Image (spheres, rainbow, N blue to C red):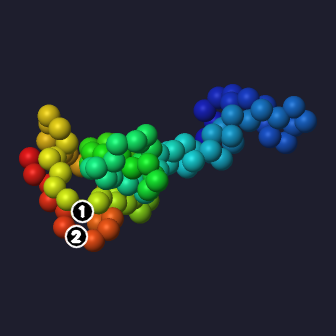
Amino acid sequence: INYGPMGVVYTASDSADMRRSHNFTRDTVANWRPRYVYVDKDWTGTETGLSANPFNTISEGVDKIGRFATGARLYITPGFYSGSGNYPLIITKPMTIYPWGSGAITIVP
C-alpha cells in the first residue's frame, strides 16, 4: 500500500526513508519506559526507580513502568504503604508485583 512520499528510498545514495527508520525504532520508542521498577517507602535520596535509587511510593513505580513493556515487574520492599497519596491506586497496565526483600507488603487506602 502506498500512503504517499516518506522521504528518499533506502536504496538511493542520498537515502532518507522515514518509513523504514520508523519501523526500525518503533519497539524501542514504545518500550522507552523501563519494565523493572523498584519501590522502597523509606527511601529519601534521588529517585530513579532503579534498585540503587528506588521510588518511595507505589504510584510512582506504577507510573514509570512502560504501558507496552513485556514482563513488567514492580519490586516493593516489605512494609505498610498508604495507597498512592490523595487518590486511590489504580493499575491499568499489566505487571507482576514482587516483594523486594523478606516480609509482607500491606497496601491500605
Near mark 2 (Cα within 10 A), the count class, few <14, some 14-19 or many ≥20, is few
Secondary structure beneath disc 1? loop
Residue 36 vs 104, above or below: the answer is above
Disc 2 to disc 1, C-alpha distance: 5 Å
Q: Amino acid at mark 1?
A: Pro
Q: Which residue is mark 1?
A: 78
- Cβ atoms at labels 2 and 1 below 8 Å apart: yes
Q: Which residue is mark 2?
A: 103
Residue at 39 percent across and 50 percent down: it is 54
Task: Residue 21: name its quadrant.
Answer: top right
Task: Residue 12: name its quadrant.
Answer: top right
Residue at 55 percent across and 49 percent down: it is 27
Q: Amino acid at mark 2?
A: Gly
User: Is residue 77 shown left or right of residue 26?
Assistant: left
Q: Which mark is residue 23?
A: none
Q: Residue 46 appears at what percent x and percent y?
A: 43, 40
